[in-house]
Every structure is written in C-alpha cells, then in structure tokens.
Amino acid sequence: MREILLINVSGEDKPGITRAVSEVLVAHNCDILDIGQAVIHDNLNLGMLAKIPEGQEVTLVQNEIFYSLNAMDTKVRFQSISEQSYEHWVGQQGKPRHIVTLLARRVTAENIARVTTITVDQGLNIDKITRLSGRVPLERIDDNSKSCVEFSLRGVPDDMSALRASLLEMSSEMDVDVAYQEDNIYRRNRRLVVFDMDSTLIDAEVIDELAKEAGVGEQVGAITESAMRGELDFKESFAKRMALLKGLDESVLEGVAERLQLTEGAESLISTLRRLGYKTAILSGGFDYFGRRIQKKLGMDYVYANQLEIVNGKVTGNVTGEVVDGERKAQLLREIAEREKVDLEQVIAVGDGANDLPMLSIAGLGIAFRAKPLVKATAKQSISKLGLDGILYLMGFSDRDTSHWE
C-alpha cells in the first residue's frame, strides 16, 4: 500500500539538511509531491511531501531520515496524509490567487494581525507570507525606512467590496498602505509605466511655482487644489490659472526648473525600470518645458505635456496645441501602448490628481501616489507612506532582486 508522508524539519540552518532528507527518499524510490523551505534569522523550516511506494516500510524511511539528521542538531516531525486529504489539497490549486501588499515605514505585529483577520474573515486562505523589504537594523527606523510584507492568498472573497473597504479603513487607521490585486500572469510581466509629473515625479506643482513668480500664488494655488480634488473640470481650471500667468517673463522658467526636486524614490524606480527593460513615459497636465528636463534627467522614453505659448519673451496665458487633460492622458497611454505593442494589462499608470483617474482606470495597475482622498478611494491601488520606489513591491520585486544594482 502506498502512503503519503509529510516531513517537517526545523533547526539551525546548515548546509546539507535538504540533501540528507532527499538522499533517503531517493534510496527508497519515493516521489516528492511538494517541497518548501524558509529561513528566518538563520533558523530553517523545511517541508517535504513524499509518496512512499508500495512495498516500502514507512517506519524504515522515517528512521533513516531521523538518523541522517541526528548529527545536524535538527528536529524532524512526520505526519501521514490520507489520499482523500491530498486530493482535496490538489483541488485547491484551481482557485483564484490574490496578493495583499502591506507597505509602511515600519510594519508592526498589529498590522500583520489586522491583515490576516480581514482576509481570513473573507474566506481567503494564506498560502505564503514574504518580506520584500531588506533587513532593518533595530535603531534605524526613520523617515526613509521601507518595510513591506507580501501575502499570497487563495480563494474567492465573500464580499469583494467589503474586503476593499476594510483594507482602506485599515490603511487610514494604522497609517500604512495596503494594496490588493489579482495574482495573474501580468503582475510581473508589465512592460510600460506612465507617470503624471507634478506632485508625482516631482514634489511640486509647476504652475503654482510659476504663479508665485507672477505674484498670484494664492489665487492659482486655490484653483489647483480645487481641481486636484475633482471639484473643477481640468480644462476650466487650467484656463483660469493660465490667464493669471499672462505677462510672466520667460526668464523665470529656468529658475523654476532649477529648483524642482524629484520625489522620494523617483530616481531609484526609473533606473530600476530601465535596467529591467521597461518603457517609461511622462503624461502631464503641466508644461513640456519642465517635462523635457525631467525626461532627460531620469532617462525616460516619452514625454507629453502642454506647450506654453510665449510671445516677445512673455507668457501669453495660452498653450499651443491640444490641452493634456485627463481624457487626453488616457488616449496617449493607449497610443504609446499600441506603439510599443503592449497590452493595457501590462501598463502601470501613476498619478495623484483627479485628472489622472482616466489613465489609472484603464491601466492594468493604476496607482494613486500620495493622492487626494477622491483619487485614493477610486484608484485600484495607492501608495502614500513610501516613495515612488515602493511601486516595485507592488510589482512583486524585493530589495534582494535590485540591491546588486545600487
């Protein structure tokens, strides 16, 4: 009679443990049905599910494994698995898979407990938990620290809307980001990433900076805030703000460009994406003059933004060509994807304002970055607590994957 044996080995991580177990199984012509290993702080947990062929003594197999590991100061535990239980387990592999990503400056036990409670209450089974961020020294939790834990889930949520609402509530209450996405073939097969510029790739709204130079900073800033919250149509708000800039001297553009600062994590993210072969684009409701600077600095592939009209060295208050509003951004995203022969599911879009929602909604992964509440609640995913390079975690990359490039 054939039997199925679950073998669990734990103890200090040492070379040769997996070999010792597998050599015994080879000697008895056993098949390995499943295998998994994890090491936390130099402590090993190894699991093997083996099929013992008919005619082989299970007790003999167990004894040989026990003695082969005896000198390695490890503990081994055996469990007999019924064929019915095994077949049920095999049947689970067809269920949908999902990923929950927890991002914060510091992940706490309370954060983990809350995520697991929410997912289990929705009938989801946790298959695997992985730390994607690097090891953090005890005394170095600061404003630039990054911590990320990924949960691999299986099953169908009882109520998808309730699940997303619970995760959003957790994010707000616990000052963390929690992303939920389907685990499909596109997740680590994205090919194009498009970004808004102002308050996304850079930490300022350029039109507000120009307004300060023109002495109308407060008026323009108020209109910008209203537009970002979705209270004003972008084209309407843009026209009002541009009118206030009429007469601004062209010479101030250079000074504004020089003082613009890239957002935390922007350089790291773009350089990593370039090394991985991704195409990148800026789709901005701001101005081409500044977009070209950022494109050159970061080495991005495309930039589309509004063209300031300047006559006799003065800003006229108008732009030339079609205004890049929300719908235009979505259209440009489609055009670039088609040009690059990329499916929309393989596109990531990142932005912070209401005029970014159209492109966020059609991309396979739409990310609201440090966004206004309306945008954060509407977008598929959001990041507020970490820098732009936190996007790599949502794509499934760990610090180990990219550390050799730093």
Image (cartoon, rainbow, N blue to C red):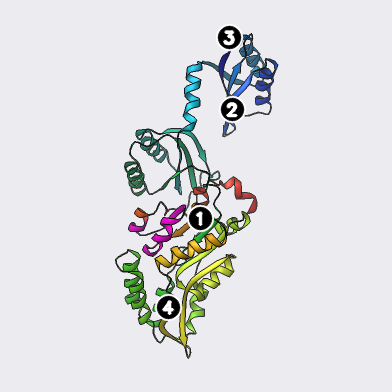
The residue labelled by disc 3 is 1
Within 10 Å of disc 4 (Cα), the crowding (few <14, some 14-19, many 20+) is: many
Q: CA distance from mark 2 to mark 4?
A: 60 Å
Residue 388 in the magenta stretch? The answer is no
SS label for mark 3: loop
Report the front residue among 43 and 161: 161
CB atoms of marks 1 and 4 within 8 Å? no
- How far apart marks 3 and 2 lie (CA) works out to 23 Å
Disc 1 versus disc 4: distance between alpha carbons?
32 Å
Residue at 40% of width from left, 41% of height from top? 111
**Mark 2 nearby-residue class (10 Å; few <14, some 14–19, many ≥20):** few
Q: Which residues are magenta?
A: 353-375
What secondary structure is marked by label 1?
Answer: strand
Specify the amino acid type for callout 1: Val
The residue that label 1 is drawn on is 347
Q: CA distance from mark 3 to mark 4?
A: 81 Å
Q: Secondary structure at mark 2?
A: strand
The residue wearing badge 2 is 35
Residue in front for this viewpoint, 211 or 74: 211
